Image (spheres, coloured by chain):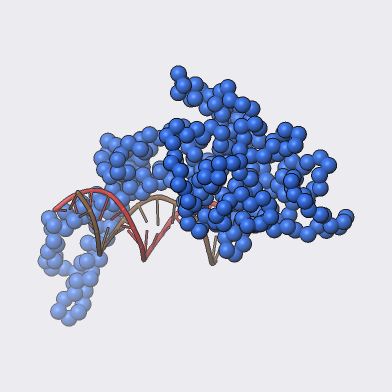
Chain colours: A blue, B brown, C red
Amino acid sequence: MLTLPFEEPHLMREPRFGASYSRESLPESLEKEHDRSNSDMREAEEDMSDREEEEERESEQDDNGLPKKRGPRKKKPGKEFERTKVRRHEANTRERCRMHGLNDALESLRKVVPCYSKTQKLSKIETLRLAKNYIWALSETLSAGKRPDLLAFVQTLCKGLSQPTTNLVAGCLQLNARNFLTDHNGEVMFSGRSPYDAVYPYPGSDVNTPPGHSGSSVDGGAKPFRHYSYSGAYEPYYENPSPEGGSPPFDGQMSPQMNFNGIFSLKHDDPPDGKGNHYGMRYCSAPGRTALAHNSMYRVSPEGRFPYDLHVRSQSFQAQGEVNGSFHN
DNA sequence: TAGGCCATCTGGTCCT
DNA sequence: AGGACCAGATGGCCTA
């Protein structure tokens, strides 16, 4: 599942995440933010206390109900008041750091779910939803012990996601995003041409018929849409109808040695110049392993070609190889 | 301009 | 008592 090397060990260091926010333990970026926010807040606070003082004096009234501008000032709680202020200030700082830690964790989650993009970040809620779907889909894959249907896999990923996020996921797979519709129940439906055909038409096959399916296209004219859902006719792969229906039964035990190298990682690696916005799939494979298509969880076309437009990033391929290599050494 | 998303502040509650 | 955690309120930014 972790298709990227865990790059942020500092997030794992604390036994209880964010339990202690000592200044020394703050990451550099956080520390900067910390400083900035602190100074901002100090200024704001001073500003505030001045205003409060002014307002307090103006709100004081004499015996006739008129505003009292002069005279002895009402005694402030003094030391206790200052102490409360300081404690509130410290609590605010801690809370801010805690939220930053939470955001950092969310950011690292974004990096391990499909379709990571620096330029088009998933929102917090969408990240969590996608992560949940991803876990669910992978669990299903493991428990089924067979190669999943890519369409069903994507449908699972998109379950309950907003249309823009669905588009993003579809974009990752180089699929026609308009083919994935989310109905009012959050069910991801597939309509129109099969992505198999949209992306990789099989020579000689009916354009509207996915491989291995008998379907008749309407002669010549408009072709009726076929709607797919989990329980639809498109080789339903998952036994459970929906991730919303609870966690899939997982009676197996995840082995620590489990190798995820054969699983696709759908990532968007921004080019170094940061200009591109191209989504692609990255395939992680250990050196010496079998060829991409052979090792793939996904279907291979009758010609032995992979039916999807894969963008194998040689760089990440190599990096993964290095990691694996050093691991095995 | 409305709506979505986000960061921050704040007070309350729970836990150590 | 103090810190962590939580949820509500608020305001800023961005986009359709």
Residue drawn at the location 30% of the way across and 39% of the way down: A14
Q: Is residue A130 left or right of residue A179?
A: left
Q: Is residue A15 left or right of residue A300?
A: left
Q: Residue at x 52, y 42 (%)?
A: A142
Vertical position of residue A322 compared to residue A90: above or below: above
Q: Position of residue A250 (x, y in %)?
A: 46, 48
Instruction: Identify the residue at horizontal 72%, vertical 34% (top origin).
Output: A305
| Depth check, front residue: A183 or C14 | A183
Residue A137, horizontal then vertical, whole percent: 54, 47
Closer-to-camera residue (A216/A183): A216
What residue occupies the far right of the structure in this picture?
Answer: A220
Q: Please, which residue is most extreme toward the front here?
A: A251
Give residue A23's quadrant in the image.
Answer: top left
* Residue A266 against residue A122 in the figure, above or below: above
User: Horizontal and vertical percent for residue A275?
Assistant: 60, 36
* Whole-percent x, y for residue A185 in the image: 57, 63
Res A229 visible = yes
* Observer-nearest of A80 and A72: A80
Left or right side of A229 for A135: left
Q: Nearer the viewer, residue A83 or A65?
A: A83
Q: What is the quadrant of the C terminus of chain A in the image? A: top left
Residue A134 visible? The answer is: no
Report the side of A223 relative to A50 (left or right): right
Above or below: residue A86 compared with residue A27: below
Q: Residue at x 13, y 66 (%)?
A: A74
